[in-house]
Image (spheres, helix red, strand yellow):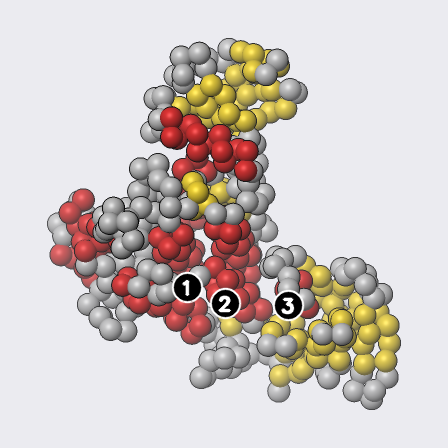
Amino acid sequence: MKFNKNDYFDYNGDRLTILDLLGEGGQGEVYLVSYKGQKLAFKYYKDIPSDDFKYNLKNNITKGSPSSTFLWPKEYIEFDDDSCGYLMELRPKEYVSFVSYLTGTNRFKNKRIMLNWCIELVKSFKLLHEKGYSYQDLNDGSFFLNPENGKLLICDNDNVTADKRSLGVLGKMRYMAPEIVRGDKDKNTGERQMPDTHSDRFSLAIILFLALCMGNPFEGECLKKYVIVDEKAEYEMFGSKPVYIYSELDKTNRPIRGYHTAVINKYPELPTYIKEAFHRTFVDGLKDRENGRTNELEWLKLLCKYRDELITCSCGKEYIYGFNEKKHNDRCPYCKKETRRFCYLQIGKNRILLEPNKYIYEIHIDKYSSNYNLAVGKVIVNKNNPGLWGIKLQLNNDILIKDKSGKEKTITKDGVIPIVNELKIKFSDTSIGQIITNQ
Ligand SMILES: [Zn+2]
């Protein structure tokens, strides 16, 4: 350990005091520090990083964070002996690791909250890629979650680089795209293919699959071939011979009954459009890295659609009614109780199943919005009459509603829209919704 408790040094004319050691990894140590009256985290590299690495780190600090979900380096600190580190915000206590979710120690409050997290994750990578960065080293250790509201934090951002620029980091096995594992040649430069947006996209799909199905999409029957899963086995499973566990073309690597129980239970629950997005990435995307992988915008639309059509059964479980499925779920898949009558709000192509605590988001009423998790309305229950439901608005403008008799009424921007059949809601000139009762 380089620093001890109460060590201090001057940085930019202010005293930085070491308060505690928060963690230690392969690359460095992370300390709790106080600086300018604020408590922060300070990562210090055990070995002196390359000039390239330092340059990249400083550059990322100058360019700034793509979004608030990234625990982004804030200040670069270099010492006389050329060793260095950086300051960042502390991770709030209510966030737990994605690893602890995968092991079952922590759970999301419900499926909707889990989808909020997935949406934040994809959105963060969309913003990162739009800023010209790639993450390069996506793995389960980088992500944190708030189980209560689905908020996300992304740590270990020091390997983030401008796309196509490389720091020599390839990533972590089980999360890397196969072309990176194999060390394929880049078709343009002839040099080794390094992580970029396209390989990030493959890794992102693996994280989403883990979040939704609690298992790795390439670990199935093939595990039986290996006495131990060593480097050679991993090279085959994730590099030279990857087979998606639900591939329609190659059924040799299905999950193992009694061993991959979570995946076997969870995968069938997914809407077909989500299954197809995975299939595309993990089957077509093995060969076609540029066009075969579901991109961030596609994921966002599909995950929002999934969230919109969730219905909560009286047994407490959430499932999809399946507006787009060949066969609707007219019974709860868990307790087999008949699906209750419900209303949904149709706006353009969106169908939002209305039930207490369900949200309408800005993307539903504004096709140019990219605020996938910004609520503009919430379904509430009338305190005096639990049979009466409404949508409590959080808008910037008043809106107009029209009931089936043709009677119009203005609802203030923070008012409540009654949920009644065939009610038309004019959010704006281009966004008109209607409440429909499913018979
Ligand atoms: Zn049920």
- The span from disc 3 to disc 1 (Cα, nearest Å) is 21 Å
3 and 1 marks in contact (CB < 8 Å) = no
x and y percentages locating residue 129 in the rendered image: 48, 51
2 and 1 marks in contact (CB < 8 Å) = yes
x and y percentages locating residue 196 in the rendered image: 37, 49
- At label 1, counting other C-alpha atoms closer than 10 Å, the crowd grade (few under 14, some 14-19, many 20 or more) is many
3 and 2 marks in contact (CB < 8 Å) = no
Residue 367 numbered tag: 3
Residue 146 numbered tag: none
- The span from disc 3 to disc 2 (Cα, nearest Å) is 15 Å
> Which tag, 2 or 1, sits closer to the chain's start?
1
Asked if residue 267 can be seen in this view, the reply is: no
Numbered disc 1: secondary structure:
loop
- At label 3, counting other C-alpha atoms closer than 10 Å, the crowd grade (few under 14, some 14-19, many 20 or more) is few
x and y percentages locating residue 398 in the rendered image: 83, 66
Up the image or down, 253 lies above or below 62; here it is below
> Which tag, 3 or 1, sits closer to the chain's start?
1
Callout 3 amino acid:
Lys
- At label 2, counting other C-alpha atoms closer than 10 Å, the crowd grade (few under 14, some 14-19, many 20 or more) is some
Callout 1 amino acid:
Thr
Up the image or down, 243 lies above or below 207; here it is below
Callout 2 amino acid:
Leu
Residue identified by numbered label 1: 294
Residue identified by numbered label 2: 302
- The span from disc 2 to disc 1 (Cα, nearest Å) is 10 Å
Name the side, left or right, on which 295 lies relative to 429. Answer: left
Name the side, left or right, on which 28 lies relative to 420. Answer: left
Which residue sits at x=33%, y=60%?
Answer: 289
Which residue sits at x=46%, y=80%?
Answer: 325
In which image quadrant can residue 354 be found? bottom right
x and y percentages locating residue 173 in the rendered image: 28, 46
